[in-house]
Image (spheres, rainbow, N blue to C red):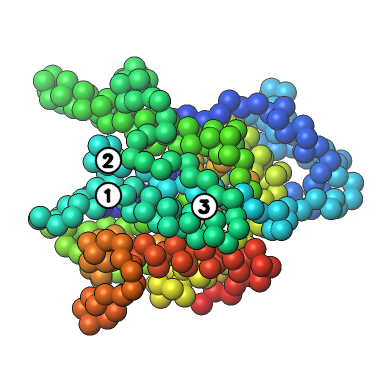
Amino acid sequence: MGRFLLCLIVAQASLPVFAADWSALARYQETISRAEFGTLLRHVYCPSDALTNYLTYGTNCVAVFSTVDKTNPPIFTLRFASAPPALRPSRDALRRIALDPGHIGGEWARMEERYFVRGTDRPVQEAVLNLTVARLLKARLEKAGAEVFLTKDDLAPVTEKRPKDFRAQAAQQIALLTRFESFPILDREAAVADAIRKQAELLFYRGAEIAARARILNEKIRPDITLCIHFNAVEWDECQSLVDDNRLVVFIHGDYLESELADDDQKLRLFSKLLERSHPVELAAANAVASALASATKLPPVEYGPNSGAIRVGENPYIYVRNLAANRLVNGPVVYLEPYYMNNRIVYQRIQGGDYEGEREIEGHRYQSIFREYADAVAGGLAQFLGGKDSNPR
């Protein structure tokens, strides 16, 4: 959020990821046709075509190389299926649902830059908002017969690591920077010390925390689908004036950037996500939930430019593919929700009102609790999706 910038967890090579074990892809040999592989790569996972710089196609296979010069042996070779296989994830099997309420909150909220307060009003911590929605949504989904899990249900980190554990790594990374070299000695010392602190914190809450949640999801919960619960925000002025703009966006996985694909871990995750073929279910679920949220909130979609690291996929104007650590590291379909700008004038007043039953009047209009509106819409969208009826964008 920064000074309330839209700040999503964009893929970074410096963030902790799982070890690049390409042997884990052996089970996908001869499970996907070359045509389907090419379609998913071109339209979802790498529309820029940057990955092809690391690929060499054979008669019925593709070899993956670590570098674009391809001088060393390939790190993996995928054999294509000779005929289109029947393997398809089914929505009928989606009964274990994981909810990941974003961010840590509590004493960590200011560090995460997911906190703001205006005067003597109730402080706004995004983690608190996310967890409030997740708890309400869990109850609604369980009532409908689903098995639901939370990655966290408090304001403590999931990871056992703390910022101090990353100081040495942060110091090594900051030592590579040249931007402080022209500073006077004392100013340089102060700037470097502050930069090390910030980098250690970043490695903690954006790296270790997300990796720890992914391990819980992949190794313990093993859900059929994961929903990442977030609120959004838009840049505001130095006076922190509340804004009139208010929008909705839903992310699913894809759009690996050229700079990211230089890292073999990122290549591995691209192949893992592509070959598990969760995209059709992910897109259908995102479509249903995004449409339900759009109907409930009446919000317009977020619009991203050509160099934003996100591209629209499908016909629903609310859905973008983006390579976020939170959906890259998690196996299976992941839908990442970002409704409401917390610094919007009306949204802010609804947040100040907390959770409540019924409706309350704000600036001449009656509003349901924003938390219940969010949870009800997602629950309704999932119910429609699981019932086999895909929604159309509103």
Question: Residue 90 at what x, y percent from top left?
Answer: 73, 56
- Mark closest to the chain's N terminus, 3 or 1: 1
Residue in view at x 53 percent, y 68 percent: 380
- Give the quadrant of residue 285: bottom right
Q: Is residue 208 above or below residue 319?
A: above
Q: Is residue 173 above or below residue 108?
A: above
Q: Is residue 254 above or below residue 193?
A: below
Q: Say how many tags the image has.
A: 3
Q: Residues within 10 Å of mark 2 (few under 14, many from 20)?
A: some
Say which element carries label 3: strand
Tell me which amino acid carries mark 1. Gln
- Give the quadrant of residue 174: top left
Marks 1 and 2 in Cβ contact (< 8 Å): yes
Q: Decide if residue 249 is on the left or right side of residue 258.
A: left
The residue to which callout 3 is attached is 227
The residue to which callout 1 is attached is 125
CA gap between label 1 and label 2 equals 8 Å
The residue to which callout 2 is attached is 106
Residue in view at x 71 percent, y 58 percent: 92
Between 295 and 239, the one lying in front of the other is 295
Residue ranking furthest to the bottom:
364
Question: Residue 311 at what x, y percent from top left?
Answer: 52, 58
Q: Residues within 10 Å of mark 3 (few under 14, many from 20)?
A: many
Tell me which amino acid carries mark 2. Gly
